């Protein structure tokens, strides 16, 4: 909360009045949960019917080491997998590519081939677990690897459940992990939509992400607006290739940031559902309620974690997680308190899981739907965020839509300006960060940090090179040639890419073939 004299405002610059009354709440009755426009939640009984999925984000070093962490988390109550990939994998480079040196397995798990994915998922029954994969530019390749491993387990595509992020537009806006220009990247996105409709019907084909937009410094209203504007662009692209919004709309999911201002965040999640329901009905003529109802995963704010007094982050994460629960999240990741310093240790990851379990089992958070609905302050904030986001979406429309606005740099400029204002307030001390610019005691806290095995990169590079040497070279060459031919034409890219992966081709080789056809994007 920032203060200036008697004025109080949220971290997004929304003024907060001393008292809210019925006069601050829009006229009209508030609909029940599970009813259009789903302000109060996508399901009528919310967590009484099904608790949110505890989905802890994990990945580091090699597939074997990450598999061990997955098993550790599942044994302690995690109910869904969430895979973090390393930077080379996210950018479509193999571990033994010279540009990957020093980055292999550092920020996530290194996955180069079908062999790696098999090790990552070894012993995990894919017909019983839901898996989320945070991957974008090469999202289709990672999903295909997952499907091929499932086949080896005897699990059919219609038994698979999970989400692949597959949101390339936010990479251009906020995160920077893109490979190809926007237009061919959108083709990969919609090809994945079509592929899953036929082969993996219960898979969520995209997780449209506001999380990284907020991490880049946006306001809550900008996070809402730019995320939903990207969602509009994906819908338009899918409709343009003949897909039905009533069908693919039911498999869209969203990914939002749970930030520090508790009440604002609850209102943000409610406003997101209301806005999206109207967009799907009014813009795209959607009549399927499941395609109108926004479902989302939330993650507590990584950028809010502080290296100073890191144990304060336990409290921050708990408050943020409660905002996601009160706002109606379908799944949730809670950050570990040491993530401003290193990847989580087993101890800090366990505390993060226990935080969610306390909220679910002890705090009464699963007892009733939309527990803060009807509160004057929450309803006023919901309407304020909805209106601010709507105005930004309308401006994006005027610029020609999300892709055009991104290509012009307008969205990026808006986020940069917001980030600068926030940082300036922190530096001036008008916005308080406990242990950083207020309540600083000068003591140094010694905590255990996770260390990645320095030999993991060498082992991974050797395995990737060995896989190339042992495969049928002629089959791999033919498969890559078919990938290039399809990229030059109009077929669904996932079909030849699946056969290339089956033939032992690596992610780096397939992405290189696509670079040769489509080029790369330079902002």
Image (cartoon, rainbow, N blue to C red):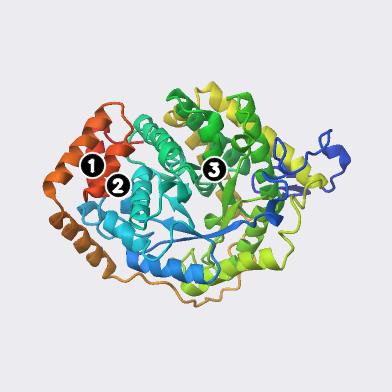
The alpha-carbon separation of the residues under discs 3 and 1 comes to: 29 Å
Q: Are marks 3 and 1 in contact (CB under 8 Å)?
A: no
User: Residue at (53%, 71%) from the top-left corner?
Assistant: 76
Which residue is nearer to you in this view: 324 or 493? 493
Is residue 11 shown left or right of residue 461? right
Whole-angstrom CA distance, mark 1 to mark 2, is 8 Å
473 on left or right of 503: left
Specify which label sits upstream in the sequence, 3 or 1.
3
As drawn, 289 above or below 16: above
Provide the secondary structure element on which disc 1 rests: helix
Residue carrying label 2: 92
Compared across the picture, whether 485 is left or right of 59 comes to left
Label 3 vs 2, first from the N-terminus: 2
Residue at (40%, 54%) from the top-left corner?
A: 155
On the image, numbered disc 3 is attached to which residue?
Answer: 253
Q: Are circles 1 and 2 on residues that touch, CB within 8 Å?
A: yes
- Label 3 crowd (10 A; few <14 / some 14-19 / many >=20): many
Residue 496 in the image: state x and y as whole percent.
Answer: 27, 38
Q: Secondary structure at mark 2?
A: loop
10 Å neighbourhood of mark 2: few (<14), some, or many (≥20)? Answer: many
Q: x%, y% of residue 96?
A: 21, 56
Q: Is residue 57 visible?
A: yes
Nearest to the observer: residue 220 or residue 506: 506
Q: CA distance from mark 3 to mark 2?
A: 24 Å
Q: Nearer the viewer, residue 465 or 441?
A: 465
Q: Position of residue 207 (x, y in %)?
A: 50, 44
Q: Earlier in the sequence, mark 1 or mark 2?
A: 2
Q: Which mark is residue 512?
A: 1
């Amino acid at each position: 909360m920032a203060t200036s004299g008697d004025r109080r405002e949220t971290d997004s610059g929304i003024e907060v009045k001393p008292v809210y009354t019925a006069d601050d709440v829009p006229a009209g009755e508030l609909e029940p949960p599970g009813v259009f426009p789903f302000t109060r939640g996508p399901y009528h009984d919310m967590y009484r019917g099904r608790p949110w999925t505890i989905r802890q984000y994990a990945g580091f070093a090699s597939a074997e080491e990450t598999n061990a962490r997955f098993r550790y988390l599942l044994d302690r109550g995690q109910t869904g997998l969430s895979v973090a990939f390393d930077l080379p994998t996210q950018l479509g480079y193999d571990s033994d590519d010279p540009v990957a040196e020093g980055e292999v397995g550092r920020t996530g798990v290194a996955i180069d081939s079908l062999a790696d994915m098999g090790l990552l998922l070894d012993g995990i029954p894919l017909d019983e677990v839901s898996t989320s994969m945070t991957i974008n530019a090469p999202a289709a390749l990672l999903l295909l690897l997952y499907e091929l491993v499932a086949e080896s387990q005897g699990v059919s595509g219609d038994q698979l459940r999970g989400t692949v992020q597959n949101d390339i537009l936010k990479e251009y806006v906020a995160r920077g992990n893109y490979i190809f220009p926007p237009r061919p990247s959108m083709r990969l996105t919609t090809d994945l939509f079509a592929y899953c409709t036929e082969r993996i019907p219960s898979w969520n084909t995209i997780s449209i992400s506001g999380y990284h937009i907020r991490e880049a410094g946006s306001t809550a209203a900008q996070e809402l607006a730019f995320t939903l504007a990207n969602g509009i662009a994906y819908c338009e692209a899918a409709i343009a290739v003949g897909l039905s919004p009533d069908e693919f709309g039911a498999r869209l999911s969203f990914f939002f940031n749970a930030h520090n201002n508790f009440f604002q965040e609850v209102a943000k999640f409610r406003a997101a559902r209301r806005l999206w329901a109207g967009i799907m009905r009014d813009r795209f003529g959607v009549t399927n309620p499941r395609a109108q109802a926004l479902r989302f995963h939330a993650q507590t704010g990584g950028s809010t974690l502080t290296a100073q007094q890191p144990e304060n982050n336990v409290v921050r994460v708990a408050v943020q997680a409660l905002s996601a629960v009160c706002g109606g999240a379908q799944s949730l990741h809670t950050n570990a308190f040491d993530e401003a310093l290193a990847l989580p240790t087993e101890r800090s990851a366990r505390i993060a899981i226990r935080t969610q379990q306390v909220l679910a089992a002890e705090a009464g958070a699963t007892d009733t739907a939309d527990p803060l609905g009807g509160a004057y302050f929450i309803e006023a904030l919901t309407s304020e965020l909805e209106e601010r986001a709507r105005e930004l979406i309308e401006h994006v429309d005027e610029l020609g839509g999300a892709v055009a606005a991104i290509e012009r740099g307008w969205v990026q400029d808006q986020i940069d300006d917001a980030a600068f204002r926030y940082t300036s307030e922190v530096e001036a001390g008008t916005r308080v960060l406990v242990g950083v610019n207020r309540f600083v005691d000068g003591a140094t806290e010694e905590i255990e940090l996770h260390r990645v095995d320095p030999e993991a990169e060498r082992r991974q590079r050797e395995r990737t090179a060995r896989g190339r040497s042992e495969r049928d070279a002629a089959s791999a060459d033919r498969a890559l040639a078919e990938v290039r031919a399809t990229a030059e034409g109009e077929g669904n890219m996932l079909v030849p890419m699946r056969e290339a992966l089956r033939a032992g081709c690596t992610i780096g080789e397939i992405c290189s073939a696509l670079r040769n056809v489509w080029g790369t994007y330079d902002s």
